[in-house]
């Protein structure tokens, strides 16, 4: 966005303390919005649009054709089932509503459970079938490389079926290469300056068009079933989207590839890098790893064949695991959140934001606000603290005569505390913003949470993993991706790894 955006925005926000600030970047005015009350006011409003984000994401990052972008931007009907009363857009051309509702239906509604279960099974099967990791210790140059490949394979197969990767075997590699260069494309640097970024995007789009052509004959006229999965195109969200696009003249093959590339990025661009950070933070702290393993073991199950499985619903409700997840997102996700007044100016306290003026909220700055996050003796915002989001219960009564309460050993008070602790985001809705907020909060957040927590559970159950850095220090976050979601690691994370045997012992118990 600008050279050294983190420092620039921190300076602006700290200097004006909750006052919206207009800044000009190139030819665009942005209104930097910060502070709990201002952010809360933005989230409460239903009269805001995100067309500035669509221009940035679908055109700059994912190469939306210009005429299709104009079609997108002309849709002023909103995301609700009922269109805005002032809109004249025909129902079959309501592309924004179709896009949002389809993702909500399949990633947050009735389609979430089967989708999440497929991801879990896929990841378990992949890791169990990896031939290059045995019961003997072996060294890996980079833990992130393992996570990004295996998690994306599992997620893409769950979402898009088996054939996207079968007919495009380099897609996972190309996707991650693209993800590392999205900041270049988002900033609009010309192709001649960074040809590699443009070439890898072209490869991803070409792969998706090839897959689209292949799966077209397998779309049936049957009604949609959120539970269904097809090996050719995966979940019904794919069929639903392509069926809707077929009624829109300007949604051609190029535009369809752009849309699906954007959906794949939205579903995985935050969750998989954040899954790496979550796993790495647990591995670097042996005492935390032991606690997490105990919580994971409590929610392990076996299927009818005696194979390891997980009750992911229970895992995702566990207070400690939720706190680790939320703290990872707080520390490692740095998103810009755009909102613009629709049809009339927006009153923000004493200030008036003009119609279509672009308000920018920096999620990272809110998530690193010391006035919010360092209250009541909380640890520094720059530090990962696994229990930051836990509300602890009172310590049990004990005395020299009676000892601890029944079932609680002399060394288990901390464990007892974790067992009755509660996870809470209360009073932090305007400061924990990895998914945005308000009416347009990311509908994929429920699957992202499941992917991260279940992925962590699977990795620490199937494998023993040890960081090789003597000081257990993790790589720094690569701030070149600031504003575009989860930050990638700047450098490698070498580990040694072996099969744990815990999944076999569980199946035999």
Image: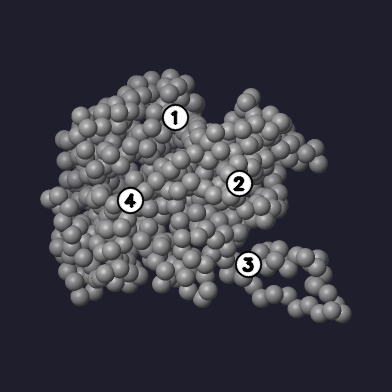
Residue wearing tag 2: 470
In the rendered structure, which disc, 3 or 1, sits on the residue that comes first in sequence?
Answer: 1
In this view, 301 is above or below 255:
below
Along the viewing direction, whichever of 142 and 243 lies nearer the viewer: 142
Q: Residue furthest left?
A: 27
Residue 103 shows in this picture = no
Tally the numbered discs: 4
Q: Residue at the location (20% across, 57% down)?
A: 30
Does the residue at mark 1 contact the one at mark 2 (Cβ under 8 Å)? Answer: no
C-alpha distance separating marks 4 and 2: 32 Å
C-alpha distance separating marks 4 and 1: 23 Å
- Where is residue 413, by image quadrant? bottom right
Res. 483 mark: 4
Residue wearing tag 1: 172
In the rendered structure, which disc, 4 or 2, sits on the residue that comes first in sequence?
Answer: 2
Front disc: 3 or 2? 2
Residue wearing tag 3: 421
Helix, strand or loop under label 2: loop
Along the viewing direction, whichever of 327 and 195 lies nearer the viewer: 195
Q: Position of residue 379 (x, y in %)?
A: 52, 67
C-alpha distance separating marks 1 and 2: 32 Å
Q: Position of residue 477 (x, y in %)?
A: 43, 48
Label 2 CA crowd tier, 10 Å (few <14, some 14–19, many 20+): few
Helix, strand or loop under label 3: loop
Compared across the picture, whether 499 is left or right of 335 comes to: right
Along the viewing direction, whichever of 328 and 489 lies nearer the viewer: 489
Along the viewing direction, whichever of 181 and 106 lies nearer the viewer: 181
In this view, 125 is above or below 353:
above
Helix, strand or loop under label 4: loop
């Amino acid at each position: 966005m600008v050279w050294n955006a983190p420092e620039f925005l921190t300076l602006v926000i700290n200097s004006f303390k909750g006052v919206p600030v207009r800044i000009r970047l190139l030819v665009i005015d942005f209104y930097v919005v910060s502070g709990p009350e201002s952010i809360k006011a933005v989230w409460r409003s239903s009269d805001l649009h995100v067309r500035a984000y669509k221009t940035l994401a679908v055109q700059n990052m994912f190469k939306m054709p210009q005429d299709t972008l104009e079609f997108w931007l002309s849709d002023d009907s909103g995301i609700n089932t009922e269109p805005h009363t002032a809109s004249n857009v025909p129902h079959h051309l309501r592309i924004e509503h179709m896009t949002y509702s389809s993702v909500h239906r399949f990633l947050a509604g009735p389609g979430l459970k089967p989708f999440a279960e497929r991801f879990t099974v896929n990841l378990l099967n992949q890791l169990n079938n990896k031939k290059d990791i045995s019961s003997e210790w072996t060294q890996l140059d980079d833990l992130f490389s393992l996570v990004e490949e295996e998690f994306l394979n599992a997620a893409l197969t769950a979402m898009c079926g088996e054939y996207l990767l079968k007919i495009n075997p380099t897609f996972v590699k190309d996707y991650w290469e693209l993800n590392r260069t999205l900041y270049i494309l988002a900033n609009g640097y010309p192709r001649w300056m960074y040809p590699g970024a443009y070439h890898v995007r072209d490869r991803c789009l070409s792969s998706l068009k090839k897959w689209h052509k292949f799966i077209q004959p397998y779309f049936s006229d049957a009604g949609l079933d959120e539970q269904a999965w097809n090996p050719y195109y995966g979940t019904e969200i794919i069929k639903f989207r392509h069926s809707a696009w077929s009624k829109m003249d300007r949604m051609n093959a190029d535009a369809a590839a752009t849309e699906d590339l954007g959906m794949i990025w939205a579903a995985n661009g935050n969750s998989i890098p954040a899954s790496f950070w979550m796993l790495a933070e647990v591995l670097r702290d042996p005492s935390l790893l032991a606690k997490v393993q105990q919580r994971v073991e409590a929610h392990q199950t076996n299927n009818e064949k005696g194979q390891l499985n997980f009750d992911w619903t229970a895992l995702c409700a566990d207070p400690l695991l939720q706190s680790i997840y939320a703290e990872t997102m707080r520390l490692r996700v740095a998103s810009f959140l755009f909102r613009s007044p629709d049809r009339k100016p927006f009153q923000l306290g004493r200030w008036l934001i003009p119609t279509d003026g672009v308000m920018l909220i920096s999620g990272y700055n809110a998530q690193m606000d010391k006035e919010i996050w360092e209250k009541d003796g909380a640890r520094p915002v720059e530090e990962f603290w696994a229990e930051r989001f836990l509300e602890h219960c009172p310590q049990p009564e004990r005395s020299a005569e009676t000892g601890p309460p029944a079932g609680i050993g002399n060394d288990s008070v901390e464990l007892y505390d974790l067992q009755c602790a509660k996870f809470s985001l209360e009073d932090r809705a305007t400061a924990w913003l990895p998914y945005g907020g308000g009416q347009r909060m990311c509908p994929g957040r429920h699957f992202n949470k499941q992917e991260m927590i279940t992925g962590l559970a699977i990795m620490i159950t199937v494998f023993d993993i040890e960081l090789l850095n003597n000081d257990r220090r993790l790589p720094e976050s690569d701030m070149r991706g600031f504003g575009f979601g989860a930050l990638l690691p700047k450098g490698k994370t070498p580990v040694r790894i072996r099969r744990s045997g815990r999944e076999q012992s569980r199946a035999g118990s």
